[in-house]
Structures are given as C-alpha cells and as structure tokens.
Image (tube, rainbow, N blue to C red):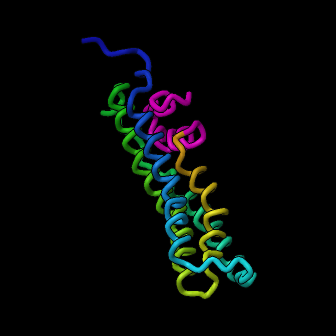
C-alpha cells in the first residue's frame, strides 16, 4: 500500500461537521419557539436598558472567551505526520473545539432564558440574547475556512502539517 503524497479529499467527516453545526446553530431557535408558549409575550413591557446591556456584554464576553480558548489545541506529534493520521487527528480536534466554542457561545442564550423566567419581562431577555448571540454562535461553530485555518495553525505549531482545511474542504 502506498502513502498518498497529498491530502485525502474531503469526505463524510466534513459533511457530518456541517450537519452538526446546523443542528447546534438552530437549537436556540427551537427554544425560542417553545418559550413563546410558556413565557408571557407582553411586547409593551420592555426590559430595562441595564438588563439589555448586561446580556449583550455577556455575549461579548462569551465571544472573547471562545476566541481565546476555542482554538487552542496541542500540536500534532511526529507520529501523526502521515496524511491520513494528521487529518483524522485534526478533524477530531476540530470537533472537540467546535463543541467547546458552542458551549461558550450558547451560555449567554441560556442565561437569557433564565433571566426571562426570573425577571418579569417575558421573552425580551431571551430574544435579546438570541438576536445578538446566534450570529456569534454560528461564526464560532461553522466549519468554514476561518475556523479551520485558525485551528490548523495551532495544530501545526510543532511542525507537523495538519491538512485540516483540506479535510474540511475549505482549502
């Protein structure tokens, strides 16, 4: 058996990661749809500006945290220098870090949900965090060129090529 000289073309791993990103990214919308039937929808009762600013700041903090820790991965070892091994390890790291970035960016949405129940402002706190937080969540979770390249830099810090953008079809 010969070892290929280049990267293995994208396969079902990339498609699986995209489907996972879609499922994770649409989950908050399902929560909002369910909460319409549970929480009061008095649209004339707006939340205080301090609550809105606090929730938006929480989304910003989650974004900054995801950017700082969500792309840190151990460098690939020389034992993983074969293209297939490097790609498999890289995709596994990508999926792990994708879940971490998802958890970090979904946290403000869950806090918004809790605030909607604790404070007497109906759906407003949840809607604020979903409107501001969902684009951040998608930005951090989608397995596109930016996220693949950022994680690849971290994985390749030891000198072993990761082939991650090629594995995800974003190269």
Question: Residue 169 at x, y = what percent?
Answer: 51, 28
Q: Which of 111 and 9 is in front in this view?
A: 111
Asked where in the image residue 12 lies, by quadrant, the reply is top left
Looking at the image, residue 76 sits to the left or right of residue 147; the answer is left
Looking at the image, residue 45 sits to the left or right of residue 145; the answer is right
Q: Magenta residues?
A: 144-171
Reply above or below: 158 against 116: above
* Residue located at (61% from left, 75% from top): 123
* Residue located at (70% from left, 77% from top): 43
Asked if residue 41 can be seen in this view, the reply is: yes
Question: In which quadrant of the rendered image does the C terminus lie?
Answer: top right
Looking at the image, residue 121 sits to the left or right of residue 35; the answer is right
Looking at the image, residue 156 sits to the left or right of residue 45; the answer is left
Q: Nearer the viewer, residue 22 or 36?
A: 36
Q: Which of 2 and 137 is in front in this view?
A: 137
Asked if residue 153 can be seen in this view, the reply is: no
Reply above or below: 59 against 22: below
Reply above or below: 80 against 96: above
């Amino acid at each position: 058996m010969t070892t290929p000289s280049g990267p293995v073309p994208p396969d079902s791993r990339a498609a699986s990661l995209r489907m996972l990103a879609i499922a994770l990214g649409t989950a908050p919308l399902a929560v909002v749809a369910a909460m319409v039937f549970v929480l009061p929808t008095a649209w004339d009762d707006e939340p205080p500006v301090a609550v809105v600013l606090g929730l938006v700041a929480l989304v910003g903090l989650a974004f900054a945290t995801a950017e700082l820790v969500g792309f840190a991965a151990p460098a690939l070892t020389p034992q993983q220098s074969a293209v297939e091994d490097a790609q498999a390890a890289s995709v596994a790291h990508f999926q792990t870090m994708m879940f971490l970035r998802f958890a970090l960016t979904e946290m403000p949405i869950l806090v918004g949900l809790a605030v909607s129940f604790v404070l007497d402002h109906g759906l407003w706190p949840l809607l604020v965090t979903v409107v501001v937080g969902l684009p951040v969540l998608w930005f951090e979770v989608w397995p596109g060129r930016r996220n693949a390249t950022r994680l690849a830099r971290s994985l390749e810090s030891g000198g072993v090529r990761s082939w991650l953008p090629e594995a995800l079809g974003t190269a």
